[in-house]
Image: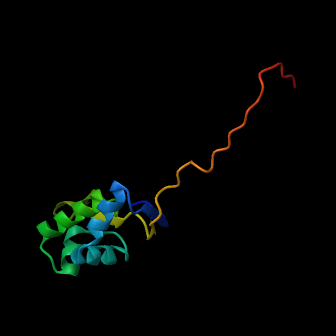
């Protein structure tokens, strides 16, 4: 797995922000993220750590993936393929201010039409 980027900025009022907050509004998913903060793990290890059945962990992992909070890849394991999960970022920065509109930052300049030379 690649190195984890440091920080992700999330704007609260966007679709992505809302989906991320929904994903974070679950104690089992927070426990999964807390466990993955120690390093990448497979679904079976996550299930043992948080005390959930593998199908339940898989569902939570899918929600966290859609929200952009973790990534996963399939790797060869002892008995077939295993899904290995890792955090996408170490920290989240939440912006409660909507993206700045260009209004107020625009300057209008009038120039007469004519011959300009350098």
Figure check: 75 above or below 96? above
In the picture, measured across the screen, residue 109 lies left or right of residue 58, that is right
In the picture, measured across the screen, residue 114 lies left or right of residue 35, that is right
Residue 112: x %, y % from top left: 78, 25
- The answer to whether residue 113 is visible is yes
The quadrant of the picture occupied by the N terminus is bottom left
Total number of numbered discs in the rendering: 0
Q: Nearer the viewer, residue 8 or 34?
A: 8
Q: Nearer the viewer, residue 65 or 9?
A: 9
Q: Nearer the viewer, residue 49 or 101?
A: 101
Residue at coordinates 22% horizontally, 76% vertically from top-left?
Answer: 28
Figure check: 76 above or below 114? below
Residue 84: x %, y % from top left: 28, 63
- The answer to whether residue 71 is visible is no
Choose top left, top right, bottom left or bottom right for residue 35.
Answer: bottom left
Choose top left, top right, bottom left or bottom right for residue 110.
Answer: top right
In the picture, measured across the screen, residue 97 lies left or right of residue 56, that is right
Residue at coordinates 21% horizontally, 68% vertically from top-left?
Answer: 43
């Amino acid at each position: 797995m690649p190195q984890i980027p440091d920080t992700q900025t999330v704007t609260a009022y966007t679709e992505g922000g809302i989906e991320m907050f929904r994903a974070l509004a679950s104690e089992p998913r927070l426990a999964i993220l807390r466990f993955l903060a120690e390093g990448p793990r497979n679904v079976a290890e996550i299930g043992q750590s948080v005390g959930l059945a593998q199908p339940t962990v898989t569902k939570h992992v899918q929600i966290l993936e859609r929200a952009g909070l973790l990534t996963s890849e399939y790797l060869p394991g002892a008995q077939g393929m295993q899904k290995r999960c890792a955090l996408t970022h170490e920290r989240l920065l939440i912006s409660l201010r909507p993206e700045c509109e260009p209004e107020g930052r625009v300057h209008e300049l009038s120039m007469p039409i004519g011959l300009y030379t350098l």
